[in-house]
Each structure stands twice: as structure tokens, then as C-alpha cells.
Image: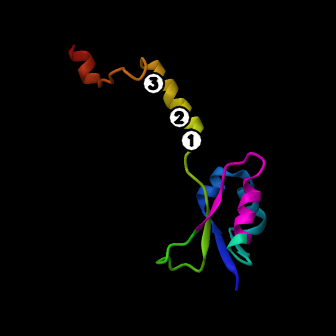
Amino acid sequence: MAYVVEIKPSARKRNPEVGRTINTEGATHRFEDRDAAEGWAEELTGGGRDHVWIQSAHPQDTSSVDAYLVSRNSRGELERAFDKRRRRLRGGDNSQQQGLAEQFSE
């Protein structure tokens, strides 16, 4: 019995190796079992690429797959760095944000 994994768009967008895999081998992959699928996900993550993992399909999922290769949609560290810079430019964490109407009424 095969363990079928489908690559979700989140994994393709986050990890360039996953995109290359889709181009050469397709978006659906068969493995002996879940352990083999998780080993494949670890190989795709190696070398500093964005983390991807195997997520079991929901019990009510009517598709023919057992699991999905997924990733987070956000970059995490880079986005937090941007927020930190924005807070600093606004005057730190203690600054009060105002709307345009509030600024012009003062």
C-alpha cells in the first residue's frame, strides 16, 4: 500500500527545491510509508531552504491523498524585522498611532 503525498502551493512558494521537484516529477508523490515521506521532506528542507513538512490529510478530506507537503505562508524573521523597523520609525513601542482625521483636528 502506498502513502500518497500532494504538494501544496505554500510549500512550492516557500521552498525553491519543492518548485523544481514539481517541474520535474509532478505535484503528487508516492512513498512506502509516512516515515519515507517525512525523510523526503527533510531532504527538501536541507541546505538552509525554508522548512517544509508532511501534514496528514483531514479525516473528512475526500481526495485520494494521505498527506500534504506544506509550509508556512509567512517569512517570520523577515516580517518581524520589518515590524520592528516600523515601530522604531513611529517612535518606539510607546507611540500612539493616529488616523489622518485625528492629526488634522489637533
Q: Between residues 105 and 17, which one lies in front from this camera angle? A: 17
Labelled disc at residue 80: 2
Q: Is residue 38 magenta?
A: yes
Mark 2: which amino acid?
A: Arg
Mark 1: which amino acid?
A: Gly
Labelled disc at residue 87: 3
Mark 3: which amino acid?
A: Arg
**Chosen colour scheme:** rainbow
Q: Position of residue 55 (x, y in %)?
A: 58, 66
84 relative to 37, above or below: above
| Residue farthest to the bottom, as pictured | 1
Q: Name which of mark 1 and mark 3 comes first in the sequence.
A: 1
Name the image quarter holding residue 98: top left
Labelled disc at residue 103: none
Q: Secondary structure at mark 3?
A: helix
Q: Name which of mark 3 and mark 2 comes first in the sequence.
A: 2
Identify the residue at image location x=60%, y=77%. 65
Q: Position of residue 30 (x, y in %)?
A: 72, 76
Q: Secondary structure at mark 1?
A: loop
Per the model, the C-alpha gap separating discs 1 and 3 is 16 Å
Q: Which residues are magenta?
A: 36-55
Name the image quarter holding residue 37: bottom right
Residue 20 in view here: no
Dot 1: few (<14), some (14–19), or many (≥20) neighbours within 10 Å?
few
Q: Is residue 83 left or right of residue 37?
A: left
Return the residue at label 1: 76
